[in-house]
């Protein structure tokens, strides 16, 4: 059986400011086997890792990501909002994260944040960067914008895609097959054991988000999910370690 993926949501975002190099480095130390992060684009076309379209919450500027250059963006402090100890953390580029994980065996789940701001050319730019690093087989592209996922699959059939959704979609494994996606990135309440089994029969994996409570992690592991997206990869690593012990 394949190991369950321990996917750190925005890095170890329970311990360090989300989507910063500090959070990415920390999750590797804590036992993550994959990293989920959010990709957007600056006004000068750089791929950057940040969740909100606005810089207000995590970088203290009223501007939108799409309206600043990389140079302007990287002058902002993306760490202090979380804890003053992280002052000086910057909004990283996708390239910085690819450089960090390249020597490890970690997978990357790149969520294209193009549901609100469309970012023309985002799919092409992400695929090009991933291919430049020779990491096509270590990336899962996901998005709430499923048109974007179809576009990614056309551009790069060799890169896996995961469908992000919140609701109780009816037989989403059929939908996944139809749009060529390999995984269902479902809100964790939209995951029941019988659905996981039916999806698995068709070769479709479940990677629910965002699961921070050990009891809910246990429920999903028992349901047979292929991975869990969490802010606390240390908690999941602990459960997975126990699961490896015979009789554990
Ligand atoms: O990819 C899982 C999760 O990150 C999706 O929601 O809003 O946290 O990016 P959000
Ligand atoms: Mg995300």
Image (tube, helix red, strand yellow):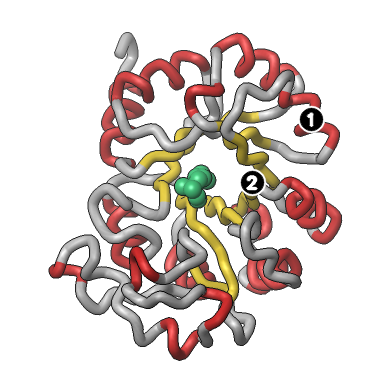
Name which quarter of the figure residue 58 lies in. Answer: bottom left
Whole-percent x and y of residue 112? 62, 57
Can residue 131 be seen here?
A: no
x then y, percent, for residue 61: 37, 77
Instruction: Please give the name of the residue rendered at 53% of the width and 51% of the height, measured from the top-left corner.
Output: 107
Name the quadrant containing residue 90.
Answer: bottom left
Q: Please give the residue where the numbered disc 1 appears in the rendered image.
A: 175
Considering depth in this image, is 87 or 137 the residue closer to the camera? 87
Residue at disc 2, secondary structure = loop
Q: Is mark 2 within 8 Å of ligand 1?
A: yes
Q: Residue furthest bottom?
A: 71
Per the rendering, the mark at residue 144 is 2
Q: Which residue appears at 25% of the width and 57% of the height?
A: 16
Q: Residues within 10 Å of mark 2 (few under 14, many from 20)?
A: some
Please tell me how crowded label 1 is: few (under 14), some (14-19), or many (20+) other residues with Cα within 10 Å.
some
Task: Locate the C terminus and report the quarter of the image it occupies.
Answer: top left
Vertical order, 174 against 81 (above or below): above
Gap between marks 2 and 1, in whole Å? 14 Å
What residue is rendered at 51% in x and 74% in y? 65
Most foreground residue, 114 or 54: 54
**Front one among 234 and 14:** 14
């Amino acid at each position: 059986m394949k190991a369950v993926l321990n996917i750190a949501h925005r890095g170890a975002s329970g311990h360090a400011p989300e989507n910063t190099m500090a959070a990415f480095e920390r999750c590797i130390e804590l036992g993550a086997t994959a990293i989920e992060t959010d990709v957007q684009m600056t006004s000068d076309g750089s791929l950057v890792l940040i969740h909100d379209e606005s810089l207000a919450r995590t970088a203290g500027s009223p501007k939108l990501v799409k309206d600043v250059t990389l140079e302007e963006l990287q002058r902002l402090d993306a760490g202090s909002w979380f804890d003053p100890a992280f002052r000086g953390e910057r909004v990283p580029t996708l390239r910085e994260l690819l450089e960090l994980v390249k020597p490890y065996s970690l997978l990357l789940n790149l969520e294209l944040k193009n549901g609100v701001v469309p970012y023309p050319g985002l799919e092409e730019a992400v695929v090009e960067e991933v291919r430049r690093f020779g990491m096509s087989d270590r990336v899962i592209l996901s998005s709430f914008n499923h048109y974007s996922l179809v576009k990614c699959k056309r551009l790069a059939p060799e890169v896996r895609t995961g469908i992000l959704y919140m609701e109780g979609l009816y037989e989403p494994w059929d939908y996944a097959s139809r749009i060529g996606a390999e995984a269902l990135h479902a809100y964790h309440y939209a995951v029941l054991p019988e659905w996981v089994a039916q999806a698995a029969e068709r070769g479709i994996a479940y990677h629910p988000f965002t699961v921070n409570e050990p009891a809910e992690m246990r429920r999903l592991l028992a349901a047979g999910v292929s991975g869990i997206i969490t802010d606390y990869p240390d908690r999941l690593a602990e459960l997975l370690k126990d699961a490896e012990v015979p009789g554990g």
